[in-house]
Image (tube, helix red, strand yellow):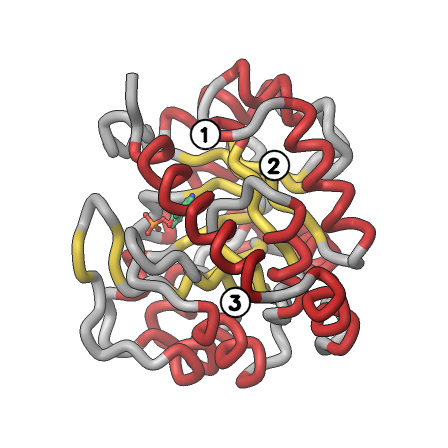
Amino acid sequence: MSTILDRIKTYKLEEVAKLKASTSLADLEAAAQAAAPPRGFARALRDAATSGYGLIAEIKKASPSKGLIRADFDPPELAKAYEAGGATCLSVLTDGPSFQGADAYLMAAHDAVDLPCLRKDFLYDPWQVTQSRALTADCVLLIMASLDDGQAAELEQAAFDLGMDVLIEVHDEAELDRAALLKSPLIGINNRNLHSFEVTLDTTRRLARRVPEDRLIVAESGLYTPDDLADLAQYGARCFLIGESLMRQPDVAAATRAILSRPLTAQGGL
Ligand SMILES: O=P(O)(O)OC[C@@H](O)[C@@H](O)c1c[nH]c2ccccc12
């Protein structure tokens, strides 16, 4: 069955081939070395999760399932609003064709705040990992559904070698078991089904118990209310990746504050 990921992979590999032809690896590596040093993404989440929730707040203009999400789209302003609202980290979509993202959005957001930033894109080639660092990414996303075990391990190592963290995204038990073979402590459970685009928090509820104890669960997609976070916290999730529900609010800082307003401690802990 063909998914959105197959379509994305096709154009992404073409894009990368063109970039490789126009930029030498030596130039790219020099740019990666010259970029601001990596900010500890996993460390920030771990710290936040010891006393409350870790929030990865996403800067996303549009998506394949929803179309345009936010017309008034200013990445540095959004980054500052997220930081003011208490986000732990940022995620910035850089894919153009499907998400109306851009590499420049990542750099602008990173420059505007002190928060660690995830480059949210579709990576298949170690070249893209080096490119991510050159774009100031502190963390990259690896989607198990579109990588085999060897590719995932190679990309993860390339990111670690550059001092970045890695968020490994899974959608089902088989992907989770493969993710557990990798080294990264960050396991993202995506509540969005990539075939149907349907979102259900049951995905996190089902998979969380299968995540090895030493990993940090990041529940991704379809989170709208403080109750959603509290609900998934009962299943072991302490970190959350939220895009659309915050992006749709006129006052992003206030919305960020509001969704974080029912932390574990306020419920008497677990
Ligand atoms: O906007 P939402 O429903 O809060 O979801 C955010 C994030 O989880 C989603 O954008 C996402 C999760 N995994 C991805 C992989 C690629 C692009 C986007 C994503």
Specify whether 194 is left or right of 196: right
Specify whether 40 is left or right of 55: right
Q: Which residue position holds label 3?
A: 87
Q: Residues within 10 Å of mark 3 (few under 14, many from 20)?
A: many
Identify whether 229 is placed above or below 209: below
Identify whether 150 is placed above or below 80: above
Q: Nearer the viewer, residue 193 or 125?
A: 125
Q: For the point 65% across and 69% down, which residue is it?
A: 134
Q: Secondary structure at mark 2?
A: strand
Find residue 84 and report its horizontal and vertical position in percent: 49, 80
Q: Secondary structure at mark 1?
A: helix
Q: Secondary structure at mark 3?
A: loop
Spatial separation of the CA atoms under disc 1 and disc 2: 11 Å
Find residue 17 and report its horizontal and vertical position in percent: 51, 50
Residue type for callout 1: Thr
Residue type for callout 3: Ala
Spatial separation of the CA atoms under disc 3 and disc 2: 18 Å
Find residue 169 and report its horizontal and vertical position in percent: 53, 36
Find residue 231 and report its horizontal and vertical position in percent: 42, 37
Q: Which mark is first along the chain, 2 or 3?
A: 3
Choose mark 3 or mark 2, whichever is in front.
Answer: 2
Q: Which residue position holds label 2?
A: 187
Residues at circles 3 and 1 in contact by the CB criterion of under 8 Å: no
Tell me the quarter of the image containing the N terminus: top left
Residue type for callout 2: Ile
